[in-house]
Image (cartoon, rainbow, N blue to C red):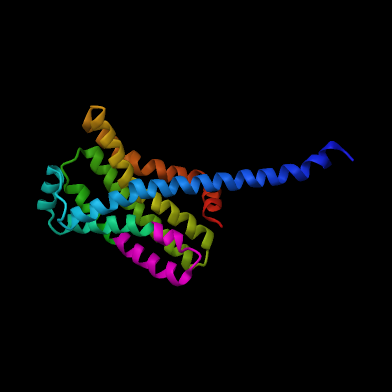
Amino acid sequence: MTDATITLPAIAPRHARDGKLRRMLSRMAILVITMVLVVPVGLVALGSGAGVIALPYEMFELARRAPLLFPAHMIASALVLLLAPAVILTRRRPEFHRPLGRLLGLFVVIGGLTALPVAIISHSTPLARAGFFAQGLVWLYLLGAAYVAIRARDIPRHAHLMTAMVAVTTGAVWFRVITGTAIALRLPFEPVYAASAWLGWMLPLALVLSNPRAFARLLSR
């Protein structure tokens, strides 16, 4: 009997344990990000869109110029952020996942369609407006592609596209993290603002698209 035949049975379980540990740590990190960043940002955006929380001056001016579109965009996008974790958690329970997914899709359509004119009329720099506009288009495209996939009963592709769509949704969170950091560090605000309008959603999207198998394993039981 060779050394390889002696050690292989021990190596396989160790790799399996390492894989489970990595998935557990990744899930814990996602949970922490959700509770610390995603939920608070979603609640603040919901309150701002509903008029319960005061808006910064720039957003107040935008809401004044688009009194229906801007609140609709804020509320719908906030509800997508808040609903997305529930849709993911119920992926093994079709009786909950399907109605929640349809509701999520409705809010994405509202949030995405209103994002386009809001981006155009905002006071941001042209580069920042282009970033917000592109985010809205990509958001809608991924939702549409995910819908086509599930209608074709291609569940893996549907799950991958919806994960990508959620990644784009989190751009609202990372945008605030980047701009807040720039303010704290007293960095030039306008260039950082314009860059974060693109990087906030492109980086998480690139992460999901670059390693679909890793995210598929992460969402598996």
Does the magenta segment cover residue 142?
no
Image quarter for residue 146?
Answer: bottom left
From the viewer's perspective, is 4 left or right of 174? right
From the viewer's perspective, is 81 left or right of 149? left
Q: Position of residue 221 (x, y in %)?
A: 56, 57
> Which quadrant is home to the N terminus?
top right
Q: Residue at x 51, y 44 (%)?
A: 25
Does the magenta segment cover residue 104?
yes
Q: Position of residue 144 (x, y in %)?
A: 39, 60
Which residues lie in the magenta part? 85-109
Image quarter for residue 50?
Answer: bottom left
Principal SS element in the magenta part?
helix
Q: Residue at x 30, y 62 (%)?
A: 107
Report how many numbered discs are placed on residues in the image: 0
From the viewer's perspective, is 138 left or right of 155? left
Q: Position of residue 84 (x, y in %)?
A: 38, 57
